[in-house]
Amino acid sequence: MIHSLFLINASGDIFLEKHWRRAQERASEPENVPPVIPTPHHYLISVLRHRIYFVAVIQSEVPPLFVIEFLHRVVDTFQDYFGVCTEAAIKDNVVVVYELLEEMLDNGFPLATESNILKELIKPPTILRTMVNTITGSTITAEIQGVIDACVKLTGMPDLTLSFMNPRLLDDVSFHPCVRFKRWEAERILSFIPPDGNFRLLSYHVSSQNLVAIPVYVKHNITFREGSSQGRFDLTLGPKQTMGKAVEAVLVSSQLPRGVLNVNLNPSQGTYTFDPVTKLLSWDVGKINPQKLPSLKGSMSLQAGASKPDENPTFNIQLKIQQMAISGLKVNRLDMYGEKYKPFKGIKYMTKAGKFQVRT
């Protein structure tokens, strides 16, 4: 059904997007577009309301009017909640917007679209709620792409079964051809005769952001003063929900505004580089020590007379956590049948950051 939803303003900029499955690549379209656009792999179905394009991404053929009706229902819901459906209103209530979209679609299929039902699940925005969301921040969208890679070196024709402590976490699973799919459907147990060597047993993803534990937090204070040639930069990282596991190989990068000429920063650990041509700031943090959190503080030199940047920079974070699966998936047991020898069995968990972005 619906995999992604984009909101596009009159100038063609995507100012909000929501993905129920894998994120789709962005594509700029001219203003006068048909409501249904076929592409080699997707269908783009859109409506134009209040100078905003609401664009749904579809992977298989569905009745277009069904999707168009849903998009109109999204617009009507926003208007009912916020009074108006404008780019500014959506940006000001972005947390409520994502909560509504999460309830209106379940894994891409319409779930709750009636306003009275939605208001029982999600309270309309108030001044207090808006202030709390602004101060504390929130996860806009999150999903986990996971894989199980196997290394098998067994003689004969062993028949293996692999069970999990919590198999219901697995969503949108793709299996190696050796897996017996019917047994997985019936018992949620992987049964297979493995090929020799390294292979990918399965891949999966967890789409509900309620199940996604963000492993690090970021404290930031990035300020630009109108008419000033100096800006302030203050960034601190810390571990969060890592079950005591170390966060390693941390690398923070950010595209600073064009008006930044240079930076003078002091890292408490690691090293940083700044390219004055591309404006790319990169901070190689390494391993986070919970007892002494890494920070990067200092000043930025701005072009004289340049106006204050419209937006603060965003930060992209890379990291690794050994012996931890952020999805919460845990192996229960691995058994071998058909052979008499006792095999050596081992498992290694690892979490890596994919597209991990923090907005300031």
Image (spheres, helix red, strand yellow):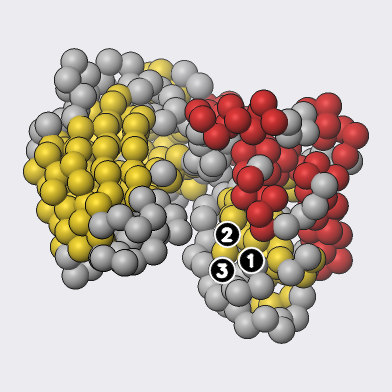
- Residue under numbered circle 1: 8
Percent from the top left, x then y, of residue 76?
A: 85, 52
Q: How many numbered discs, if any? A: 3
5 above or below 283? below
Percent from the top left, x then y, of residue 36?
A: 74, 75
Percent from the top left, x then y, of residue 91?
A: 62, 50
Foreground residue among 14 and 135: 135
- Residue under numbered circle 3: 13
Query: Which quadrant: the N terminus?
Result: bottom right
50 above or below 290? below
Q: Secondary structure at mark 1?
A: strand
Q: Which mark is residue 15?
A: 2
> What amino acid is labelled 1 in the image?
Ile
Q: CA distance from mark 1 to mark 3?
A: 5 Å
Q: Which mark is residue 50?
A: none
Q: Quadrant of residue 39?
A: bottom right
Q: Secondary structure at mark 2?
A: strand
Q: Position of 271 compared to 114: left or right?
A: left
Q: Position of 198 compared to 72: left or right?
A: left
Percent from the top left, x then y, of residue 84?
A: 80, 52
Foreground residue among 315 and 349: 315
> What amino acid is labelled 2 in the image?
Phe
Foreground residue among 120 and 307: 307
- Say if mark 3 contacts mark 2, CB within 8 Å: yes
